[in-house]
Image (cartoon, coloured by chain):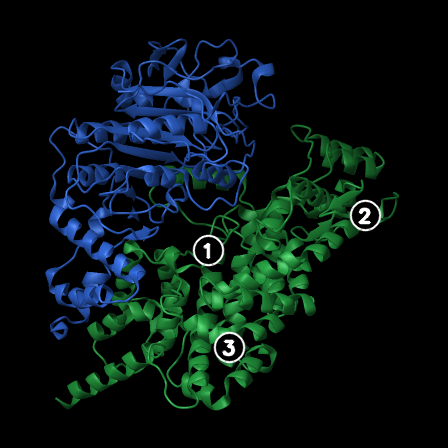
């Protein structure tokens, strides 16, 4: 009897926590209370028991300032939990060594196995990277004290989306992409973030810029010319089956403007796409052949005069600027002429600079941030205030976030009736774990994010996942969310450990499946 | 009340469903659904070798170019190919589909493909599933645009079904689309009814129309599924599906269709067609894949029978090299072939423009050229099999030409 009453009280307390964004505060600090609640629901992966009280006593502004400086927040729990994810610490070159392309015989064996049981392809090689990345994302989302940084790292990864299964190279470059290109700049300068993604092999593979060269460029002929015809290299190079001439590939240039910076209505045209593509020619990735040639040259010592450009080729899988593939002719982008210079890489750098500080970019990025954190339909004044900050600060991400979160419009618009945001599957499962004080150590929770329609690191199109409520709430998703609530409440998701449990599983399932818990 | 359910009940209930729905909620779902036509798209992932399916045995250079992969003429050898006329023949493994061809219900189309020259599986599948080659940022799939072009009035939550673990790109953005890998995992024990009722009420009472509609749709779909109970339908005597996989998705789809749940569009995928090694000639790896495909499609059509007009479209992202590589397989090529079978198909002949295997006619001197844009085929098949009033929006920025593979009937 007493136990039953205890469960009931605990269930009510839990429901109160889960539903806390719905209750209205009273008294003079109402705005502050609302802001605190909203900050927890929007700028973090959901409130843990006690978070709201802590935030209120600290004050929203101080809390936000702290979150905007993640380097000042200790995060020992996450650091320890992520210690075992060795591959996520490795460089792309190391991963390429660890997971070499299977030999012809190995691939043959794999194909035979696949054909004999087509339902379950044998998974060999670097497929575990997606599992590790997903699990690490969940660990950070649930357990990190640096919540805003984690939310922003996910936001930017989605903004600069890369699909893990585009091909093997993209997958091998993915841990470095998130670690070296996205995370360091998640709360930094938009320009630096954009540049880091532009020159990262994962992006160069995913959107094909590694194939973007001046018209008629033949990589092998170019290398031959550089080598000044030593016979041994010639023989090695000519073994290849067919001559291959490359040319302009517009894919990256188009998405760079449409999705990463200006937005589709940002005021560029097809000619701009071509000009940007030409400016980005030569932004490429070191292939296995280039490293082989480099090593052969090195092993022979300095007997022959070999150009520095070949000697200094970095490791396979690294970014490098291929001067030979660069289109040196003058370019005009968005009405501005890009001067041809002695070093062709300046063309692309000038384009990144121009795009990162463009007013269309300021407004496109500001709107997207407001859609993520405030409402599916943020007001024009809020977006333009953020956009102004963006331009004034040269794209300082924390400054833009400050303008947004500290604006009275943040609370007004985020609490406007029927303007509520719906949690994405990632936000749903992470917030369930946080609300119930669960510990995430296995891949089960990440797997559920995929079953809910958001497989992590596996969003195919460069648009990334959508943000709007309508994209995430349908009859089907309600059924799946009920299924999640049930599985979570009955503690049947592998790798999720609960602390002390008080309420009954059905009560917990009811709370987690409720419309209110789906709201962000 | 819910206290009568314990953790194990809940586990049984929730842990057992495998449903993935997508798209946006729509209001008003009809309770009764007519027996309307169904379009089934089967995606052969990995790029199926068209020359191994529709064999141009009479071409001068066929034997020379194909080498060890070359197949016998119809009527010759131990495992003869099956004559399609005009110098073409089916691979022997496609024999379950041959009667459908001779009775005029199946049409192969040669030289089909995408104008995008990519040889990347990902890019080519993406282009084919969005239906917008060259435009990668398209969010929705071509099949979802076909679903959305159906009369929305009276649609069922099962209007579009993918028997895949995740919503395929082809159906991204569809109203009323479901992805379920395996029908047999769905079960709703009555003991959970009380809890479900309380969840249902919380959605019904929500002041947001988005939540109220989504809840309405979810619980309606659940009840429809329970009432129809497709799993209880036996597979008819004499219909036999290949047992390469435990659950044949086409067998499950037939049950779903026969249960009259309102299925109009279905998507199925088949993996493993990326035959770079030891592809085999008349027997072997690819023959097994083709045998499984042909057997499943033939059994499916027989299973559904005349009760529902069904059209099956088999597609693949690109073709493979004409010549084998050094490992008895074929590499990524360009033009391929597709097949359409069932209701409304003008079958019994090979469609498409065939340019032969002379080097000057090959794409990059090595691959079959694309002489028919896949959008021409997709558009005509979708429009006529689903009787769409307006198919103009299926392929933005493209005006499909007629390929005369479907009859207007």
Residue displayed at 40% across by 73% down: A415
* Separation (CA) of disc 1 from disc 2: 40 Å
* Separation (CA) of disc 2 from disc 3: 55 Å
The residue that mark 2 highlights is A309
For the residue carrying disc 3, how many other residues have a C-alpha within 10 Å: few (<14), some (14-19), or many (20+)? few
**In the figure, the blue chain has which letter?**
B
Where in the figure is residue A362, as x and y percent of width and height? 63, 61
Residue A218 location, quadrant: top right
Which mark, residue A465? Answer: 1
Judging from the image, mark 3 belongs to the subunit labelled: A
Question: B341 or A322, which lies in front?
Answer: B341
Residue displayed at 49% across by 14% down: B62
Left or right of A341 in this view: A148? left
Which mark, residue A408? Answer: 3
Q: Secondary structure at mark 2?
A: helix
Where in the figure is residue A195, as x and y percent of width and height? 68, 58
Where in the figure is residue A127, as x and y percent of width and height? 47, 53
Which of the image's four quarters has the C terminus of chain A?
bottom left
């Amino acid at each position: 009897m007493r136990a039953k009453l205890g469960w009931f009280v605990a269930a009510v307390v839990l429901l109160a926590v889960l539903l806390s964004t719905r209750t209205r505060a009273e008294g003079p600090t109402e705005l502050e209370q609302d802001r605190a609640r909203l900050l927890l629901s929007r700028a973090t992966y959901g409130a843990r028991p006690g978070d709201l009280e802590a935030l209120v006593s600290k004050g929203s502004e101080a809390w936000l300032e702290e979150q905007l400086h993640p380097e000042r927040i200790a995060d020992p729990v996450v650091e320890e939990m992520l210690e075992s994810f060795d591959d996520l610490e490795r460089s792309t070159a190391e991963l390429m060594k660890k997971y070499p392309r299977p030999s012809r015989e190995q691939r043959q064996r794999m194909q035979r196995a696949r054909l004999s049981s087509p339902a379950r392809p044998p998974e060999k090689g670097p497929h575990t990277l997606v599992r590790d990345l997903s699990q690490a994302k969940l660990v950070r989302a649930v357990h990190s004290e640096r919540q805003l940084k984690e939310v922003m790292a996910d936001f930017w990864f989605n903004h600069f989306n890369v699909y893990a299964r585009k091909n093997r190279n993209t997958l091998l470059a993915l841990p470095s992409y998130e670690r070296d290109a996205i995370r360091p700049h998640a709360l930094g300068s938009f320009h630096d973030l954009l540049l880091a993604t532009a020159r990262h092999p994962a992006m160069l593979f995913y959107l094909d810029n590694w194939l973007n060269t001046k018209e008629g460029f033949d990589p092998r002929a170019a290398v031959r010319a550089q080598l000044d015809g030593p016979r041994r290299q010639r023989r090695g190079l000519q073994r290849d089956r067919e001559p291959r001439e490359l040319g302009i590939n517009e894919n990256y240039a188009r998405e760079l403007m449409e999705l990463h910076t200006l937005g589709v209505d940002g005021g560029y045209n097809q000619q701009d796409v071509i000009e940007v593509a030409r400016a980005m020619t030569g932004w490429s990735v070191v292939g296995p052949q280039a490293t082989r040639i480099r090593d052969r040259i090195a092993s022979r010592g300095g007997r022959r005069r070999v150009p520095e450009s070949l000697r200094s080729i970095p490791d396979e899988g690294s970014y490098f600027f291929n001067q030979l593939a660069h289109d040196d002719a003058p370019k005009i982008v968005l009405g501005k002429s890009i001067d041809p210079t002695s070093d062709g890489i300046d063309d692309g750098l000038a384009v990144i600079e121009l795009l990162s500080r463009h007013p269309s970019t300021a407004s496109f990025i500001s709107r997207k941030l407001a859609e993520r954190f405030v409402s599916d339909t943020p007001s024009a004044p809020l977006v333009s205030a953020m956009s102004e900050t963006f331009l004034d600060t040269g794209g300082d991400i924390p400054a833009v976030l400050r303008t947004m979160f500290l604006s009275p419009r943040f609370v007004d618009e985020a609490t406007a009736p029927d303007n509520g945001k719906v949690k994405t599957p990632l936000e749903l499962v992470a917030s369930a774990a946080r609300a119930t004080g669960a510990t995430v150590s296995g891949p089960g929770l990440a797997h559920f994010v995929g079953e809910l329609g958001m497989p992590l690191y596996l969003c195919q199109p460069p648009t990334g996942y959508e943000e709007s409520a309508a994209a995430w709430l349908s009859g089907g998703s309600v059924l799946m969310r009920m299924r999640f609530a049930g599985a979570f409440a009955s503690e049947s998701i592998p790798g999720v450990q609960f602390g002390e449990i008080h309420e009954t599983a059905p009560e917990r399932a009811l709370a987690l499946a409720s419309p209110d818990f789906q709201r962000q | 009340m819910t206290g009568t359910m314990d953790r194990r009940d809940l586990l049984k209930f929730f842990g057992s469903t495998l449903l993935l729905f997508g798209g946006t909620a729509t209001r008003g779902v009809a309770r009764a659904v007519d027996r309307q036509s169904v379009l089934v798209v089967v995606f052969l992932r990995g790029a199926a070798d068209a020359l191994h399916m529709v064999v141009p045995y009479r071409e001068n250079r066929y034997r020379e170019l194909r080498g060890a992969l070359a197949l016998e003429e119809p009527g010759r050898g131990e495992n003869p190919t099956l004559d399609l006329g005009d110098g073409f023949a089916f691979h022997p493994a496609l024999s379950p589909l041959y009667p459908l061809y001779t009775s005029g219900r199946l049409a192969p189309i040669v030289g089909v493909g995408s104008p995008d020259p990519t040889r990347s599986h990902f890019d080519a599948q993406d282009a084919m599933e969005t239906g917008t080659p060259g435009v990668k940022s398209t969010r929705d799939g071509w099949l979802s645009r076909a679903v959305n072009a159906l009369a929305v009035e009276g649609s069922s939550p099962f209007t579009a079904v993918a028997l895949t673990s995740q919503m395929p790109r082809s159906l991204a953005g569809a109203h009323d689309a479901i992805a379920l890998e395996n029908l047999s995992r769905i079960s709703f024990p009555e003991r959970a009814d009380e809890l479900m009722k309380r969840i249902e009420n919380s959605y019904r009472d929500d002041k947001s129309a988005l939540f109220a509609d989504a809840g309405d749709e979810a619980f309606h779909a659940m009840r429809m599924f329970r009432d129809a109970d497709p799993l209880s339908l036996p597979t008819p005597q004499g219909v036999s599906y290949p047992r390469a996989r435990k659950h044949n998705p086409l067998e499950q789809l037939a049950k779903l269709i026969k249960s009259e749940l309102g299925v109009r569009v279905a998507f199925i995928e088949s993996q493993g067609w990326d035959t770079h090694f030891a592809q085999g000639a008349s027997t072997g790896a690819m023959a097994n894949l083709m045998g499984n495909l042909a057997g499943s499609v033939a059994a499916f059509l027989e299973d559904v029978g005349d009760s529902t007009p069904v059209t099956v479209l088999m597609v693949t992202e690109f073709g493979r090299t004409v010549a084998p590589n050094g490992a008895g397989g074929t590499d990524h090529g360009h033009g391929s072939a597709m097949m359409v079978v069932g209701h409304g198909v003008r079958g019994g002949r090979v469609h498409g423009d065939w340019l032969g295997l002379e080097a000057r006619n090959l794409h990059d001197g090595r691959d079959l050229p694309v002489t028919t844009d896949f959008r021409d085929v997709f558009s005509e098949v979708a429009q006529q099999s689903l009787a769409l009033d307006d198919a103009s929006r299926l392929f933005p920025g493209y005006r499909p030409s007629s390929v005369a593979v479907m009859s207007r009937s």
